[in-house]
Amino acid sequence: MRAGHEMFVHMRHFRTAGAPRRANLFDDSPRLVGRQTVNARKAGIVGSNLLNETANIRREISSRWHETSLGL
């Protein structure tokens, strides 16, 4: 097996764990999405709940980011 390929195979399942496949303000790299998934699992959030929770968190971050950039 090629060096590094093993890690790719290991990381690949994060993509299917409820991560939205869409471009947005945030880095949607598998590593970051994977981290969110792991944290959500620790918090006991699974399945479609995870999708909603991730969307809520991103919406929150987004609105706060806009508030700060507007100086509110």
Image (tube, grey):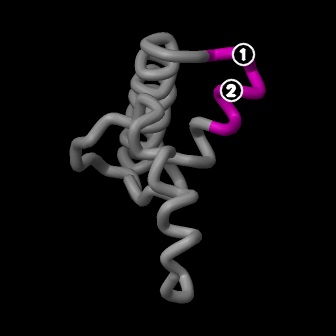
Rendering coords of residue 39 (x, y %):
70, 35
How would you classify the magenta stretch by its main secondary structure?
A: helix
Lateral position of residue 41 relative to residue 32, left or right: right
Report which residue position mark 2 lands on.
Answer: 41
Nearer to the camera, 55 or 7: 7
Which of the image's four quarters has the C terminus?
top left
Identify the amino acid type marked 2.
Arg
Rendering coords of residue 54 (x, y %):
47, 27
Whether label 1 touches label 2, CB < 8 Å: yes
Q: Residue at x 23, y 49 (%)?
A: 23
Q: CA distance from mark 1 to mark 2?
A: 5 Å
Seen in the picture, residue 69 relative to 64 is either above or below; the reply is below
Rate crowding at label 2 as few (under 14), some (14 to 19) or many (20 or more) other CA atoms within 10 Å: few
Q: How many marks?
A: 2
Q: Residue 28 bears which disc, if any?
A: none
Q: Secondary structure at mark 2?
A: helix
Identify the amino acid type marked 1.
Gly
Question: Quick check: is 56 in the magenta stretch?
Answer: no
Magenta region: which residues?
Answer: 38-45
Nearer to the camera, 2 or 22: 2
Report which residue position mark 1 lands on.
Answer: 44
